[in-house]
Amino acid sequence: MYKRLGLAVLLAGAVSAAPKVVAVDIDGVIHPITVAILTHALDQAASQNAAAVLLRLNTPGGLLEATRQMNEKIVASRLPVIAYVTPSGGRAASAGFFILQAADVAAMAPGTNTGASSPVALTGQMDETMRHKVENDASAWLRSTVEKRGHNAELAETTIREAKAFTEKESLDQHLIDLIAPSQQKLLDTLDGREITRFDGRKEVLHLSGAEVVPYELTLRERVVGSIADPNVGFILLVVGALGIYVEFNSPGLIIAGVGGGIFLLLGLSSLAVLPLNWTGVSLLLLGAALFILEAHFTSHGVLGAGGTVAMVLGALMLIDGPPEMRIHLVTALSVSIPFALITMFLLTLALRARRNKSLMGGEGMIDEIGQARTALAPGGKVFVHGEYWDAESSSPVESGAQVRVVAVEGMKLRVEPKAAPPR
């Protein structure tokens, strides 16, 4: 019996001693929220005494500044970081290549590719001098990382200078990565017992046999912002929110339009707030809104409205200062801006017409109404106006049966005057 208990304790100890690997997915465009996810994942791994952190990469690239911050976190990590381009058909392009090279271990799944890291102009075309400056800066940064990791620095630089890209086999054969693994489990099994050199030169042996892979749990903010981080989604939320608030201002009391509009507007702003904005794009969006308002006030035969639509489309396309993957698509800009322009001008026109029309309710609705004196007014008496009998006083005597015009309403009494006879 005691032997069985001892064996059970030993097995429990072995299970509890199994190493942990915290896995975090870096997919989609790289932006500031990706930096936050990586930072929290590294903190989680450290708090759980994990053996390593596994970055599962599948990204077209992203913002250079966010990539720099991620690389700083990776090279400064107390725990080994393994970058794995997966699944088959995935890629670690542009900024993803920088992250792959920064990791302690660079691995790729079959059927993946990496590279194509040439910097892209945020707005317009870069002149030759500026392009050389940006490329030289990025190349020096990449070389300093790749050389530390023992990879082919000269070939890595061609991903910037010549925008070259490589398959997983080409990357392994030319020493840009450390290994190819068909699966995550195979990757960990292959790395078990391997000695790696950390960024600071320290040697460390990986112990990953039977490792438990623990997925990183996103925080609530990361879930919300991550799900709406696409600038196309953010732009749609922003426009829908603005429209909802406008409807609420024009029809107070609807409540649902204002509440929903406020929520959508804040979500849109939070989505775009994590991205670098181009103030020319912001200005064009504001100009578009101003032109829609002017179109409702002035007869321009659609010129102001068309100009507002064009300004809004251009503003949407220029709104994000980032690579093409992070900009608002032309299809999104057109499909959102044109309906928004039509709806806004329609609602503005209705609102202005309602304000110009004479009120038909209450005392103001009685002004200039024509009625009939049912008694002689000298000056007071009874009149019949708008289907109702009223006490009235006239500015001059009126015979019974004569027509009168209402000039004022004083509580429950009307001020009237004789209706002028038509000219002969």
Image (spheres, helix red, strand yellow):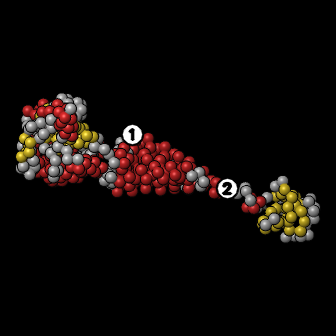
Spot occupied by residue 274 in the image (x, y as percentages of width and height): 33, 52
Spot occupied by residue 280 in the image (x, y as percentages of width and height): 35, 55
Asked where in the image residue 208 lies, by quadrant, the reply is top left
Quarter of the picture containing the N terminus is: top left
Q: Residues within 10 Å of mark 2 (few under 14, many from 20)?
A: few
Relative depth, front residue between 273 and 259: 259
Q: Can residue 15 be seen in this snapshot?
A: no
Q: Is residue 209 above or below residue 230?
A: above
Type of residue at label 1?
A: Val
Spot occupied by residue 108 in the image (x, y as percentages of width and height): 17, 34
Question: Tag on residue 331?
Answer: 1
The tag earlier along the polypeptide, 1 or 2, is 1
Asked where in the image residue 179 lies, by quadrant, the reply is top left
User: In the image, what residue occupies the spot 23% across and 50% down?
Assistant: 47
Relative depth, front residue between 335 and 174: 174
Relative depth, front residue between 205 and 125: 205
Asked where in the image residue 336 lies, by quadrant, the reply is top left
Question: Tag on residue 357?
Answer: 2
Q: Residues within 10 Å of mark 1 (few under 14, many from 20)?
A: few
Spot occupied by residue 266 in the image (x, y as percentages of width and height): 43, 53
**Disc 2 secondary structure class:** loop
**Left or right placement of residue 385 versus residue 209 in this view:** right
User: In the image, what residue occupies the spot 42% across and 50% down?
Assistant: 267
Relative depth, front residue between 28 and 300: 28
Q: Is residue 370 above or below residue 49?
A: below
Quarter of the picture containing the C terminus is: bottom right
User: In the image, what residue occupies the spot 85% across and 61% down?
Assistant: 390
Marks 1 and 2 close (CB-CB < 8 Å)? no
**Left or right placement of residue 111 versus residue 356 in this view:** left
User: In the image, what residue occupies the spot 31% across and 53% down?
Assistant: 276
